[in-house]
Image (cartoon, helix red, strand yellow):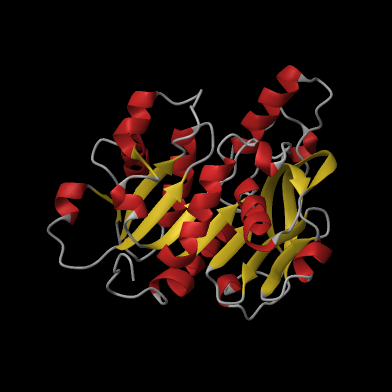
Amino acid sequence: MPIKVPDAMPAKEILIAEHIFVMDESKAFHQDIRPLKILILNLMPDKQSTEVQLLRLLGNTPLQLDVKFLRMESHTSKNTSEEYLSSFYNVFGDKEVCGAKFDGMIITGAPVEQMDFESVNYWRELESIMAWTTGNVTSTFHICWGAQAGLYFHYGVPKFPLVRKRSGVFSHTANKPGVKLLRGFDDVFYAPHSRHTEVRREDVERVPGLEILSESPEAGVYIAASEDGRRIFVTGHSEYDSFRLRDEYFRDVAKDPSVLVPENYFPDDDPSREPMTLWRAHGSLLYGNWLNYYVYQETPYVLEPGR
């Protein structure tokens, strides 16, 4: 089934070239079914590549989705033009966002993890958005720093600095294999991580109603979720494409030659060689399970604002 995006959005042509079923707004208007309304708060500096990565996974399901992108009004982007943002993004104050309800929402990571939450210049606005999700979104999927921010805001779970950046592809296991979010997962599966901070198992375990669903011996807590499935927290980047860690490494090593090569990523840890993608199937299954079991099967058919 298709994913609906704005007609002129550049990500549309990239996804079509990858044979992902993308429907333009004019065609979707004539379909007599209700697509799932998905809101994506994109906090990443490189907005367009993040759009493609997330839409690629969301479009690989049998569900029709109506995707809307959200940006922070209290933050001026240095990497994406205002013209682009005005064309394809809403701000939270828009009635079609704050005055509406959504079936699902994604809150991405952001390169601010080494700052205290309250020092991030858009933290107050993000707090308002996360508070709003409680009554207006069926299930919210938090990624990396977005997961740390959500755990801190909703449950008071702190983050801690790492001795060095955790960058690479790590093996994970399922703590609760019978949980719907993990259906179809292998006994061991892989996911990329790219972060300077962590949340600790003991802090998550102290929170009633919060479960650790998956973790890694090297990377720590990977997936946590509320028991009702309304909040999902993923500390890694299952949405990353094959070369995202490579690009981050080359960017970082250009600034600091002592930066270590991402773990378990380049063959023989040789950055001149093309990396292998070990997490593509896992990423598709994770997002597919979330959309099916936690959004589609839980959301009401009629979304009533203000209910």
Number of numbered discs: 0
Q: Is residue 144 left or right of residue 268?
A: left
Q: Quadrant of residue 100?
A: bottom left
**Nearer to the camera, 241 or 26:** 26
**Nearer to the camera, 301 or 275:** 301
Q: Quadrant of residue 48?
A: top left
Q: Is residue 175 above or below residue 57?
A: below
- What residue is drawn where x is 65% and y is 37%? 245
- What residue is drawn where x is 47% and y is 48%? 54
Q: Is residue 282 left or right of residue 106?
A: right
- Place of residue 221 in the rendered image (x, y in percent of width and height, measured from the top left): 75, 60
Location of the N terminus (image quadrant): bottom left
- Place of residue 253 in the rendered image (x, y in percent of width and height, measured from the top left): 74, 23
Q: Quadrant of residue 275?
A: top right
Residue 85 in sight from this viewpoint: yes
- Place of residue 270 in the rendered image (x, y in percent of width and height, measured from the top left): 77, 31
- What residue is drawn where x is 69% and y is 47%? 193
Q: Residue furthest right?
A: 163
Q: Is residue 184 above or below residue 118?
A: below
- Place of residue 295 in the rendered image (x, y in percent of width and height, measured from the top left): 43, 69
